[in-house]
Amino acid sequence: MNGTHAQRGWTRRLVVLIPYLWLLVFFAAPFAIVLRMSVSQNAIAAPPYLPLFDPAAGWQGVKDFVGALSFDNFQRVFSDSIYTFAYLKSLQVALVSTALLLLIAFPIAYGMARAPRRTQPALVMAVILPFWTAFLIRIYAWVNILQRDGLLNDVLRALHIIDDPIGWLSTDTAVYIGIVYSYLPFMVLPIYSALEKLDHSLLEAAADLGCPRWKAFWLVTLPLAMPGVLAGALLCFIPVVGEFVIPDLLGGSNMMMIGQALWVDFFNNLDWPAASAIAVVLLALLLVPIVIYQHVQTRALAGGS
Amino acid sequence: MSSGNASSAPLVRIEEAVKRFAGVPAVDGVSLDIARGEFFALLGPSGCGKTTLLRLLAGFESPDEGRLFLDGEDIAPIPPHRRPVNMMFQSYALFPHLSVGGNVAFGLRQERLPRTEIEARVNEMMRIVGIDQFARRKPHQLSGGQRQRVALARALVKRPKLFLLDEPLAALDKKLRSQTQFELKELQRRLGVTFIIVTHDQEEAMIMADRIGVMNHGRLVQVGTPADIYEHPNSRWVAEFIGEANILDGEMAGRTEVRTGAGTLKVVPAASAQGKVCIAVRPEKIRLTGERPHPAPENCLSGRVNTVAYRGDMSLCTVALESGAELKVAVPNFARGQSQVNAGDRVFASIDANSCVVLTQ
């Protein structure tokens, strides 16, 4: 009896351990490596940075290693306006895209949640169907659609909306189209799942208490969909800030998001320490919305008292 | 505000209301008047249309046929949010994102009343139903009984002309339920609001309501006071649905006698009864004795006790009559520690003619 109890306690602890182990192996350890690189110096060597830690030198080796570390890369990231602009551009793109995504995804999710129950699984399927095609191929398809002699211009000209083709490609608009298209399922699904759980009798109760339908939407539906809205916004905002492929393929040469800056430093300049410093600062920036989200979540759980 | 004329007219008048779902009638030609200040119960098995009738009054459904009047006004075209009617939902439907105080104030905020008045009325109503100490909590932090009170306060704070309660006590445990039944009755008397309650629990309906409307298959089969319905059921179905009843099939033999399988029984002369009838007798209206009683009662049947089910306050016995029919008999347990009857006892069952209800349908 006692033995099985202890055993159960042990397995339970093991189950809890798995996510921590996962975090350690796939987040904490790689991040430690990136952090260590970010305080190193660029060097023409293999690996292309200094100092290297020499365990054979003992205590003196540790001292030499720590003494050679510096925050020069961070100083550069903060002082060079290219990086500042890239960060700001990324935040701007992420904010605008998240807002656009919300505006488009909410009505879709609302419509799905109000659809007859038996058609809902098919609608959810339709939302995630694009994932069946590789991401890169879908973005290349947009290159085709948006280019000067592409599908979009053909359609617009056939409808006599425009006379001369518009250069959609290599503009901010193209990047926004690509991002909204790619991230839509990540916004729709959390909002749908929040709306789908909404008890219809709450809306009847609101009507019963004298609240017209449009007002009940603001007073009941929207507040109860908020957890889904927040989760969706976070799920889109954070990866969009670090987005590289979409701005690289659809954006113009003047568009430089932080992901692109990182790419240039890492692959073109072979400056691993600078690229690492960019990544560390990006992570610190993204902690802000996550902490806010956590705070809101705990407050919602704790209730008003 | 209300003239003498208005108060004598019924508050609610339902005329031949019909509501169908996908062609199947849920409410099938119901006509009913409910007086101002009345506590009315709609009672029936699940699926009998009682909740649909309530939702017609609340405005969540609109009738396919017939008319609904509230205070003389045809309310069919009025949307639910403009009706002076409030409903308490079976699930309570409390807003999970609002505090108790926010829930109770919700309805008054829609009326754009001054803030101070809202606050005063909300506080008063929360005190009346005893939830003032939970004002800042969220619904998920309350017990079932507390949530039920929040739902009650949220609807009653609107001072509705008509208050609809859909199975208000179904989610409470038995002890709390019977306590709340008396509190609801007291609250209704104190506020003077007309209550219509939907329930499938006949005991609950009888304890609380001034009048009961028994529904079956979308129709109102009998309307009357609890005593009317229990003592004078108008059909075999009502007699069997409300409480326990022994039903004996038979045929009229003259004006005061019915020939049944259990023997010929004397009954009180019934005006229209002819031909095939059945007799309903409540188990507590049958007396069991070990010897043939003197003077001889109007009806006396002999038999043997088959089973005895002890219920504490009384025992419910089945008596196998010589004719082969079986009677359910309630025997009160007067004395402590000893049963009045035991299985296998030979007994005589005495029944007054007045206790035999003659049913023609």
Image: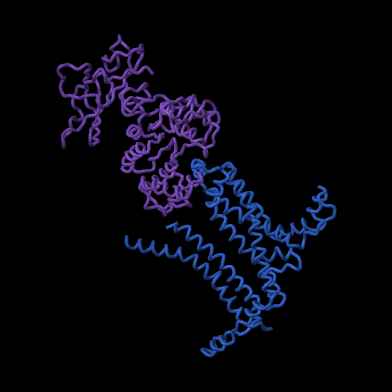
Q: What is the image's colouring?
A: by chain
Q: Quadrant of the C terminus of chain A?
A: bottom left
Depth check: give the residue in front, B158 or B147: B158
Name chain B's colour: purple
Q: Quadrant of the N terminus of chain A?
A: bottom left
Residue B333 shown left or right of residue B151 in the figure:
left
Q: Residue at x 43, y 33 (%)?
A: B46
| Residue B11 placement: quadrant | top left
The reply to whether residue B6 is in sight is: yes
Relative image position of residue A220 (x, y in whole percent):
52, 48
Residue A108 shown left or right of residue A148 in the figure:
left
The reply to whether residue B44 is in sight is: no
In this rendering, is residue B32 above or below A212?
above
In this rendering, is residue A39 above or below B89?
below
Relative image position of residue A59 (x, y in whole percent):
51, 89
Residue B324 shown left or right of residue B1 in the figure:
left
In this rendering, is residue A129 above or below B267?
below
Figure disc tally: 0
Name chain A's colour: blue
Depth check: give the residue in front, B119 or B86: B119
Depth check: give the residue in front, B31 or B12: B12
In the image as oriented, which residue stretches furthest toward the top? Answer: B254
In the image as oriented, which residue stretches furthest toward the right? Answer: A163
Relative image position of residue A28 (x, y in whole percent):
54, 72
Q: Residue at x 70, y 59 (%)?
A: A176
Relative image position of residue B358 (x, y in whole percent):
32, 17
Residue B143 shown left or right of residue A35 in the figure:
left
Q: Residue at x 31, y 21 (%)?
A: B280
